[in-house]
């Protein structure tokens, strides 16, 4: 099996699905390669049955886009691919075209750490059809998973309230890249630190950790293990107390803490990793307080997530630090977000834009045409609605938005409301015009954004649906295009949907 040094080459242009390249070849042979096109990257439903998502992954996408080139090894590999007839899959003129191709797309995106909702374009790509098409798979790969993990982290941190949440998922993550992406995304979502030291070095995330059960087991008894650890790292003492008997382990930690204190150092706390965490934390807190260790924190791990944390807090658990691993970095209860990348408009050089729509029997899968932007409205310090609108049509001061999946659900956003357009320029004509903010600033943005939304959308059960809809004129255009497409198909002899 190839290791990272073989997998991650300087060129990542082949980080794509084959069908992107077969379509690109089709565009090339059909004379459509340089036709201008606009695509939007969206998602269809909020993850985890929640009321929102946290946009994430843009910095990685920017890095990938900046180095998007087909190098000689890429071209040689593509030349080796064979079709069903035993001949080369791609012609040499097409491969020459790819080798010489220079990025020329305009890219706009919603900054990382922004709260976002279904059907809103997180990324808008406008440029030559062949290039815009080739960006589909990598952009989805680089945006979907980080957005999922940042959202999960935000939910977990909300459940923990003012307590500290640590990301402990490296050993259970899906490979090196999955672990690093999860650590960065979890930090943006609100986690205070990670156990992943490489993520700490690469991204500047604080790192935390003490010892495992193996440390305790390699000594003759628990007391000796705690004393040895305290001697080795007197400035990092959180003792894992459940190797043999949890409450007896707490008592042993207290004795080690006393000796540590006598030497001029402080026991930071204890960690619980199994058993009835509510009961054990309450009992441990009492033992610690009675021994004079009122400032020693209780850390808990053991397959935690937002619902388990909420339950433990409701039971009176005295846990102050939550180490969350598997269920965070793997997005355990929903391992993927339904991100899609859809064509919305095309035009020939010098011509007018032609709107495009993809229809479906499922309303949630019907795409939205146009060149889209998202405007977020605010009233009395609270976000009150988002309007997805066409930049060619514009947006009046005061508009009506329509639920993308239910035309009977509409909301009027009055004139004079404070507002902000969410998509900002990232690339112009293939050249970067955006500087990703420092990671702590992205993290602060996510926290600040969540503060401005009604608590109902942040509920875990049956969250309120935030009004994020399509501006009425754009919705009317979408409806017109759907009806036209269905009528056209009906005229060709295919069945159209009827009531």
Image: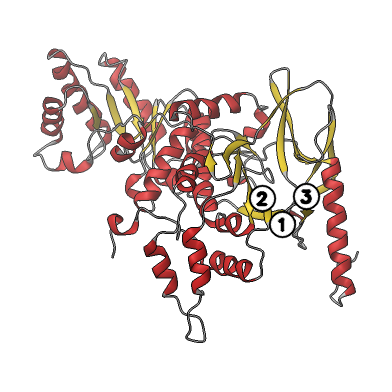
Q: CA distance from mark 1 to mark 2?
A: 7 Å
Tag 3–tag 2 contact (CB < 8 Å):
no
Return the disc, 3 or 2, that comes first in the chain's sequence.
Answer: 2
User: Where, by quadrant of the figure, is residue 48 drawn?
Assistant: top right
* Crowd band around label 1 with a 10 angstrom C-alpha radius: few (<14), some (14–19), many (20+): some
| Image coordinates for residue 403, horizontal then vertical, percent | 79, 43
* Crowd band around label 3 with a 10 angstrom C-alpha radius: few (<14), some (14–19), many (20+): some
Left or right of 236 in this view: 47: right
Residue displayed at 39% across by 55% down: 11
Residue annotated with mark 1: 365
Tag 1–tag 2 contact (CB < 8 Å):
yes
Where's the N terminus, which quadrant? bottom left
Q: Mark 3 falls on what kind of element?
A: loop
Residue displayed at 44% across by 28% down: 438
Q: Mark 1 falls on what kind of element?
A: helix
User: Where, by quadrant of the figure, is residue 222 drawn?
Assistant: top left
The image's colouring method is: secondary structure
Residue 425 visible within the image: yes
Residue displayed at 11% across by 30% down: 228
Residue that lies at the very extreme toward the left in this rendered image: 220
Residue 496 visible within the image: no
| Image coordinates for residue 384, horizontal then vertical, percent | 74, 28
Closest to the observer: 128 or 390?
128
Is residue 130 shown above or below 161? Answer: below
| Image coordinates for residue 28, horizontal then vertical, percent | 60, 67
Residue annotated with mark 2: 44
Residue annotated with mark 3: 405
């Amino acid at each position: 099996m190839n290791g990272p040094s073989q997998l991650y080459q300087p060129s990542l242009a082949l980080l794509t699905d084959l069908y992107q390249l077969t379509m690109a070849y089709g565009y090339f042979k059909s004379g459509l390669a340089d036709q201008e096109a606009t695509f939007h990257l969206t998602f269809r439903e909020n993850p985890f049955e929640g009321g929102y998502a946290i946009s994430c992954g843009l910095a990685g996408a920017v890095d990938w886009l900046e180095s998007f080139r087909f190098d000689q090894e890429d071209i040689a590999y593509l030349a080796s691919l064979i079709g069903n007839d035993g001949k080369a899959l791609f012609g040499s003129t097409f491969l020459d075209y790819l080798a010489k191709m220079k990025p020329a797309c305009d890219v706009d995106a919603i900054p990382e750490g922004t709260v976002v909702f279904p059907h809103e374009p997180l990324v808008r790509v406008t440029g030559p059809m062949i290039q815009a098409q080739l960006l589909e798979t990598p952009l989805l790969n680089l945006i979907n998973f980080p957005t999922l993990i940042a959202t999960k982290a935000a939910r977990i941190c909300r459940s923990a309230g003012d307590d500290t949440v640590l990301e402990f998922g490296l050993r259970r993550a899906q490979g090196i890249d999955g672990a690093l992406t999860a650590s960065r995304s979890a930090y943006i979502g609100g986690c205070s630190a990670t156990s992943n030291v490489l993520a700490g070095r690469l991204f500047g995330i604080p790192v935390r950790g003490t010892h495992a059960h193996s440390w305790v087991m390699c000594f003759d008894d628990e007391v000796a293990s705690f004393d040895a650890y305290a001697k080795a790292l007197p400035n990092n003492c959180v003792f894992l107390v459940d190797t043999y008997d949890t409450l007896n382990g707490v008592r042993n930690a207290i004795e080690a803490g006393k000796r540590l204190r006598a030497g001029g150092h402080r026991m930071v706390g204890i960690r619980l990793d199994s058993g009835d965490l509510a009961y054990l934390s309450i009992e441990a807190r009492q033992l610690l307080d009675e021994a004079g260790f009122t400032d020693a924190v209780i850390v808990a791990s053991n397959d935690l997530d937002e619902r388990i944390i909420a339950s433990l807090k409701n039971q009176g658990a005295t846990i102050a630090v939550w180490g969350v691993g598997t269920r965070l970095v793997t997005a355990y209860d929903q391992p993927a977000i339904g991100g899609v990348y859809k064509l919305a408009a095309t035009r020939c050089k010098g011509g007018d834009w032609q709107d495009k729509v993809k229809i479906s029997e499922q309303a949630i899968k019907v795409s939205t045409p146009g060149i889209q932007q998202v405007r977020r409205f605010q009233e009395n310090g609270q976000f009150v609605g988002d309007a997805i609108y066409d930049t060619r049509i514009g947006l009046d001061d005061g508009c009506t938005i329509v639920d993308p999946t239910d035309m009977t659900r509409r909301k009027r956003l009055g004139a004079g409301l404070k507002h902000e357009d969410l998509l900002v320029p990232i690339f112009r004509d293939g050249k970067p015009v955006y500087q990703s903010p420092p990671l702590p600033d992205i993290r602060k943005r996510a926290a600040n954004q969540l503060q401005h939304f009604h608590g109902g959308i942040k509920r875990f059960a049956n969250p309120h649906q935030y009004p994020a809809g399509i501006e009425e004129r754009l919705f009317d255009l979408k409806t017109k295009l759907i009806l036209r497409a269905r009528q056209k198909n009906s005229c060709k002899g295919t069945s159209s949907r009827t009531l």
